Amino acid sequence: MTLTRTLLASLASAALSLAGSSALAQTPAKLKVGLMLPFTGTFAALGTAIENGFRLHVAENGGKLAGREIEFVKVDDESDPAKATDNVNKLIKRDNVDVLIGTVHSGVAMAMAKVAKDSGTLLIVPNAGADAVTGPMCASHIFRSSFSNWQPGYAMGEVMAKKGHKKVVTITWKYAAGDESVRGFKEAFEKGGGKVVKELSLPFPNVEFQSLLTEIAATKPDAVYTFFAGGGAVKLVKDYAAAGLKKNIPLYGAGFLTDGTLEAQGADAEGLMTTLHYADSLGTPRDNSFRLAYAKTFKMQPDVYAVQGYDAAQMLSIGLNAVKGDVSRKAEFADALHKARIDSPRGAFTISRSNNPVQDIYLRQVSGKENKLVGIASKALADPGRGCRL
Ligand code: BEZ
């Protein structure tokens, strides 16, 4: 009798533990996503828009990607390259994240890419255009949902050469993004017959433009090409107009000059022409539904940064679905992305061999509070991926 009771008890406990383990097997562990973005400083609004966009896609999927619930671990990288390696190491070693999403600033992104490459951690860059990330530093598990700095610059070089401008001055922040944007611009502009006669810059994130604007006035170029973003873009556009330059020397830029900034720039931005992989008035059903959902959720209009965050989540989702949520299957994850057409609000795009978007670059013009679509400046533009060996 005692033996029967013992036997029954152990059978019952075995059944319970079996049931428990099958329940566990059906509930995959949460996917830890390390969001390393600027939440303070001149790029703070850009970091928030990226996070919003990412969360919107996750929410549209019921809070899960490839069946795994998402747990976010956030770090404010302050757009400070000096703190970047420590910040990313904390996410990997202390927080054990499965995937890194970040960041905005090219200098910080290069430090992230180095650590991600050395540690084999999956990284999706939702903004920073540092050419090196999908160039010499490229890796099969490092992707970008945004652009390379070369892309909008190159497209604007073609536009301005076709407009017949011959003599151009450039002005930007002296760091990878500014330098590479100007280099892309110069490559196309000089190929098209123009000449960059002066390259002006100031250290990031300085915004004391006065002496540089005086130099532009003295040089009297046909036009100016610029790369600035966030708070710096707001100040440049306002100072350029206040210096009386806007009416005589047209200002053009990579589209970050006027994206997410128009409320603050007001009439000083009116009429400015820029090139970017997004515009406010695309009018496609895909973009309209994205814009509606974003505005409803966050009570603000989306911008290019929101789109890039949303698409980082879409790319993660595509890769994860292919590997059934197992981030260690990196080759299959990459393969899925190389075969995909990402159904972005910007228009569908593909991923190059060096893991950068191949995408249309639009010419836009500011009208009121919108970057209105003028046309396609460069169709399916692929970054050359110079130095990438994959
Ligand atoms: C960059 O550092 O790569 C960057 C920052 C803001 C907007 C665009 C690019």
Image (cartoon, rainbow, N blue to C red):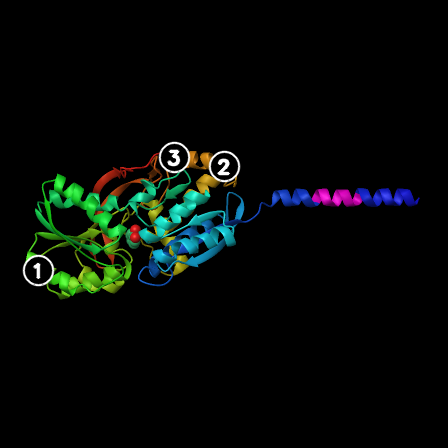
Q: Nearer the viewer, residue 377 or 96?
A: 96
Range of residues picked out in magenta: 12-19
Q: Is residue 196 left or right of residue 30?
A: left
Q: Which residue is mark 2?
A: 329
Q: Is residue 51 left or right of residue 303?
A: right
For residue 390, the mark is none
Residue 15 in sight in this render? yes
Where residue 186 sits, quadrant-wise, is top left
Q: Position of residue 310 (x, y in %)?
A: 39, 49
Hey, what amino acid is under mark 1? Ala
Q: Which residue is mark 3?
A: 338
Residue at image coords 15%, 65%: 210
Image quarter where the C terminus lies is: top left
Majority secondary structure in the magenta region: helix
Q: Nearer the viewer, residue 235 or 181?
A: 181
Q: What kind of element bears circle 2? A: loop
Image quarter where the N terminus lies is: top right
- The answer to whether marks 2 and 3 mark residues whose Cβ atoms lie closer than 8 Å is no
Real-space Cα distance between discs 1 and 3?
47 Å
Q: Position of residue 330 (x, y in %)?
A: 46, 37
Q: Position of residue 120 (x, y in %)?
A: 45, 42
Q: Position of residue 7 (x, y in %)?
A: 85, 42
Q: Which residue is mark 1?
A: 217
Q: Is residue 140 left or right of residue 203?
A: right
Hey, what amino acid is under mark 3? His
Residue at image coords 30%, 62%: 42
Real-space Cα distance between discs 2 and 1?
56 Å
Residue 312 in sight in this render? no
